[in-house]
Image (spheres, rainbow, N blue to C red):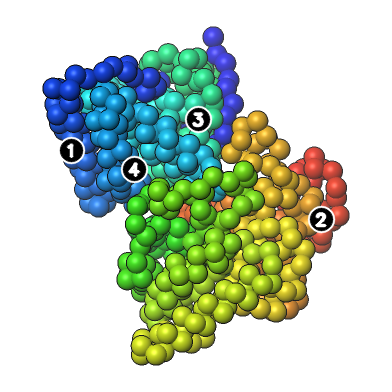
Amino acid sequence: MSFTLHGLAVSQGIAIGHVHLVSHALLEVNHYHVAPRYLDDELARLDEALATVQGELIGLKAITTSGQAHSEVGAFVDLQLMMLADPMLVDAARQLVTERRCNAEWALVQQMEHLVEQFRQIEDPYLRERQADVVQVVERLVKVLLGHPGHLPPRRRDGLGSIVVAHDLSPADTIGFRDHNIAGFVTDVGGPTSHTAIVARSLKIPAVVGLHHVRDLLEDDELIIVDGTRGVIIVAPDEQIVEEYRLRRSELEIERSKLNRLRDTRAATLDGEEVNLLANIEGPKDLPAVKSANADGIGLYRTEFLFIGRDTLPDEEEQYEAYRAVVKALPGKPVTIRTFDVGADKALNGAQAREEPNPALGLRAVRYSLAEPKMFKTQLRALLRASAHGRLQIMVPMLAHAQEVDQCLTLLEKAKAELRAEKIKFDEGIRIGGMIEVPAAALSLGMFIRRLAFLSIGTNDLIQYTLAIDRSDEAVAHLYDPLHPAVLKLIAGTISSGARFGLPVSVCGEMAGDPLYTELLLGMGLRNFSMHPGSILEIKQQVLRADLGELAPRVQRILKMDEPARIREAVERLTA
């Protein structure tokens, strides 16, 4: 009997294939005592498992550097290798084995639970979901300790691929499946920033996540259809439905091939208004994707990925090299680098983790930077040095107060003075901008316009704070609405204020890379979009079809509406 399941659409496309169930190790391992005379053997068993998993990950890393897997996958493998080397994981487990005379599996799981709890305090949804890396690293170690090998899907003779159905998937899993005709991914858990979502998008494999107990509803080898555009799973479809989706898939593939022809076309509307399409990146490893899409520059370089998942902070030289590599790789193009958007709750150093009653409203982003001026100035020096190699500009996250901007500018001037005294070159005219992510900032733009050279709207946080919604909390995620009238008024107000005072404004949140919102944002006056590199060509297509003379008055009418259902209908008609 055919039936339909609904989840979160995180990677577009249509997949038709057979279910391949991947078992999920719940890590409910037995706890037993080890006799003192066998403790050395138990520690040796843990060390052997560590060496095995490190070897596996290094092998996977070699695949990513050889170009057989996307660079984003390599970044995740690097993060898991760092976690294996972090004393807070394996060394702490080793200490538990010695002190409590317990088995290695149990010690690893106990330490994993401690670290996961620290990650749960993180406000940023992308970084919070990195707790999955801890779980997956420990899973790999426990599987080796228990002697449980992995299980790859069989080769299909009917020409259809396998749909991997799992509780969750790690980047290493996705690489392991790379030569086995994987058509799609389906998982119980996850969201737009989960591993499965990010890797599936980068590999252009359809994926639907957040289906809760999907593994319990499907059987191995069962035929299913994955609609990664609508977030729908069709189980046991009849031949008529299969044919319908085959046709739809062919149409999508034709559209995708057409998009590649737009790579070198300048993004401009039908009435000649040029639009900048920029990329969001985490580091130099994302440069191939940026160049593949021929992005107009970098609109958001998230520097916190240099800081997270390590026991020691990156020094000035390491940061300088990471920033310089990106700037030099994009000569003549702007590279906007955001100062680290982390907080004390994000456990940059595990030994210094601090708990906060509400991390989302606590010491994070610019607040944390100003609370740690030495660390912040080190980053500013590295950024200034890298600015000598191209068009680098600095962006400060989560501003809400004028004094925050003033303090940042004061620290920047101190860093400049130090470099001048040391006769180190930098761009004296470097531009400093700020992120509008807090409603208070969007409602009091004057104080930022007077102090800054550009603004960038972080729609993810702006929506979250405006609606008081934690979008990663499944109980309220359905209330997270980019088209809420209050959200639209804040975005439109920021764009129009920037235009009025001649200050460039960009959008670098998820809305910028979603074609549903392209015409809406263009009609508001937005001319700078920053997004995942994989979304650039699709957004460019939307821009090329847009007529601003027609769009602007229609969008102004939408901004006067206050019924969400009417707003959504009107926005959907913009793209029709």
Determine which of the numbered discs, if any, sits on residue 189 in the image: 3
Mark 1 and mark 2: Cα distance apart in space: 58 Å
Residue 388 at x, y percent in the picture: 40, 82
Determine which of the numbered discs, if any, sits on residue 51 in the image: 1
Question: Disc 3 vs disc 1: which is toward the camera?
Answer: 1
Residue 268 at x, y percent in the picture: 60, 68
Q: Residue at x 51, y 39 (%)?
A: 120
> Image quarter for residue 39?
top left
Q: Horizontal placement of 499 versus 538: left or right?
A: right
Looking at the rendered structure, the kind of residue marked 2 is Leu
Assess whether mark 1 and mark 3 are in contact (beta carbons under 8 angstroms): no
Mark 1 and mark 4: Cα distance apart in space: 17 Å
Q: Considering only order in the chain, which callout, 2 or 1, is on the residue closer to the N terminus?
A: 1
Q: Residue at x 34, y 43 (%)?
A: 88
Q: Residue at x 54, y 9 (%)?
A: 1
Question: Disc 1 vs disc 2: which is toward the camera?
Answer: 1
Assess whether mark 2 and mark 3 are in contact (beta carbons under 8 angstroms): no
Residue 344 at x, y percent in the picture: 51, 53
Q: Considering only order in the chain, which callout, 4 or 1, is on the residue closer to the N terminus?
A: 1
Q: Considering only order in the chain, which callout, 2 or 3, is on the residue closer to the N terminus?
A: 3
Label 2 belongs to which residue?
559
